[in-house]
Amino acid sequence: MDAEKKDIYFKIFRYNPEVDQESYFDEFKISVEKGITILRAMNYIKDHVDPKLSYRFFCQAGICGSCAMKVNGVAKLACTTQVWDELKKCKTPDVITIEPLGNLGVVRDMVINYNPVVDKLEKFMSWVEPAKKDSAFGEKEFIVAEKDFKIIDAATDCILCASCYSECSILDAHKDFVSPLVMLKAFRMNADTRDTASQKRLNLLTKDHGIWDCTHCYKCVEACVKNIPIMDGIHGLRNSAMNRGMKGEGYRHADAFRKDIYNVGRLNEPLLLLRTKGIFKVIGMTSFTIKMALKGRLPSLFVKKIPGLKKVRELMRSTSKR
Amino acid sequence: MKYAYYLSCVNESMTKELDKAFNLWKNEFDIEIEPLHAGTCCGGSNLEYVNPNQHLVMNGRNIAMAEKMGLDLMTSCNTCLLVLRHTKHELDHNEEKKAYVNEQLKKYDLEYKGTSEVKHLLWVLNEDYGLDKIAAKVKQPLSDKKFAPFYGCHILRPSSVMLGYDDPNSPSSLDSLIKVLGGNIVDYNSKNKCCGFHTLLVAEEESLDIGGNAVVEALDNEADYIVTPCPLCHTVLDGYQDEALKRKGRSGSIPVLHLSQIVGMALGYSDSELGINKHMVRK
């Protein structure tokens, strides 16, 4: 029986900075068989219609991570994404949109400038810094126990495709943000039993544009082509920073939740502001506070304790060991 | 339909109008609630890294209290939804963690069994009550208005712990509700994006940029209102709209409604009855 076939339109982002004033979209109509991936459809267009179409790919098996691009607005690997699956997600029927990853500059068409990722991987020491001197290597194996590897197992699946980088909400607002990808690597290295640089890494990660700037939007988790729970890694880094008493606005903000549950059972919103920012910064926010007060939206400083708070406190105490 | 109702800290303090509006019409929709007065704050997606054990035990307790009542647990806040669903997911899939939580809870005559579902009000309206029945209740169709739905992150992502109500890349449950209320939808890219709430106090500029993008896009698409099922998104999009638009170098303003308020509007309640006059941005 002949394979199911269909005429499909590929609306593809085009930009060549040497020629084009600005980017535009080209539309290619090709006949596609069911079972074909986005990458194979792109290869067909490059081989038979427009050889100038530029994009990266290598392994064609979801391993090298080089063919990540936005398909119908979402970062994906072109080589593991089926055209037929995408047909269900088209805004205009049978028109599949292809764009470069977000949050990274465009070199040409779908080829993005990967350098910021490499720079950040380097800045945050995304490698194991072993206790052994280089000269001592080869003398004795350094075995990672299975239970220790389990902690970093999922994180080691990362193929650096930068899909998470593309979708990150905070990177969209500030290009210096460390990025989910680099935080995941840092978590993986910090939790590696052979590594000795965790404190150094945490010192870097708790500076401006570091771990505390992640807004928990889970876009990275949703975009990860390897289904890595990236937020567990980010939370893991924050947990380490807190356990090591690395205090700052991020620490104070997060710890306020724990304290309020213990003290009243609920969050004390006005005090949260005060605790996170400190009294001097809060005084500087008076115009906002006055506007809120005029609307009757300023919460009371005194939050009513929840019924049964005594039991809650007992539970908080008996589970306090981190 | 009866639910244990999880009281979100933000709705008890800064966005009281959300529950005020909900309480006006819930009986008309046969929704009965048992407020979880003894429930604790969910930890706002922070407690899980401050102290993972406390996060599991306190939120396991919140769900176990609903289980003891024999009711599903409903919330009107996206972040409470995420934290409670995350907890449920962990306890339902990890016997060791469940045993730890129950060891702690048994002293208080509570047990986490996994028998109660955790749902958002938006899901309850869409599926438990049903859009057909909602359409039949509408007294004042919102047909002369254009709405920009803003879902917020924690009702969509991570989809692995949600109930599959929405495709996180192309959600539709809020759109569907607005449509049955007679409203017109503005289709814009920001609808499944982040408002920036959770970094508002530690990375304010970035947060306002993110929230500002959604407001600007809603304005560009000539929406009359933004509607959100999350009181935290509301806090940014309404409370910080002025600052966010200033950062974007934009003029204009757009009122932001809670899910409970837009339902109330279609049922004929006035702005003051629904607490819309308490918002920072007015029409």
Image (cartoon, coloured by chain):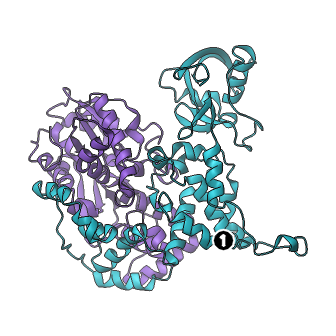
Chain colours: A cyan, B purple
Residue A307 vs residue A225, the one in the foreground: A225
Q: Residue at x 62, y 60 (%)?
A: A124
Residue B101 visible? The answer is: yes
Q: Is residue A16 above or below residue B46?
A: above
Residue A283 occupies quadrant: bottom left
Residue B259 visible? The answer is: no
In this rendering, position of residue A179 left or right of residue B228: right
Q: Mark 1, residues whose alpha carbon is within 10 Å: few (<14), some, or many (≥20)?
A: some
Residue B54 vs residue A232, the one in the foreground: A232
Residue identifier under label 1: A197
Residue B31 vs residue B145, the one in the foreground: B145
In this rendering, position of residue A113 left or right of residue B59: right
Q: Residue at x 61, y 53 (%)?
A: A120
Q: Residue furthest front?
A: A18
In this rendering, position of residue A267 left or right of residue A227: left
Q: Is residue A311 above or below residue A77?
A: below
- Quadrant housing the C terminus of chain B: top left
Image coordinates of residue B3 in percent, x first then y, are 29, 59
Q: Residue furthest right?
A: A139
Image coordinates of residue A255 in percent, x first then y, are 39, 73
Residue B112 occupies quadrant: bottom left
Specify the amino acid type for callout 1: Ala
Image coordinates of residue B274 in percent, x first then y, are 13, 47
Label 1 SS: loop
Q: Residue at x 21, y 63 (%)?
A: B13
Q: Residue at x 21, y 29 (%)?
A: B145
Q: Identify the chain of the residue marked 1, using the numbered disc in the image.
A: A
Q: Is residue B197 above or below residue A36?
A: below
In this rendering, position of residue A270 left or right of residue A188: left
Image coordinates of residue A71 in percent, x first then y, are 57, 32
Q: Is residue B89 above or below residue B192?
A: below
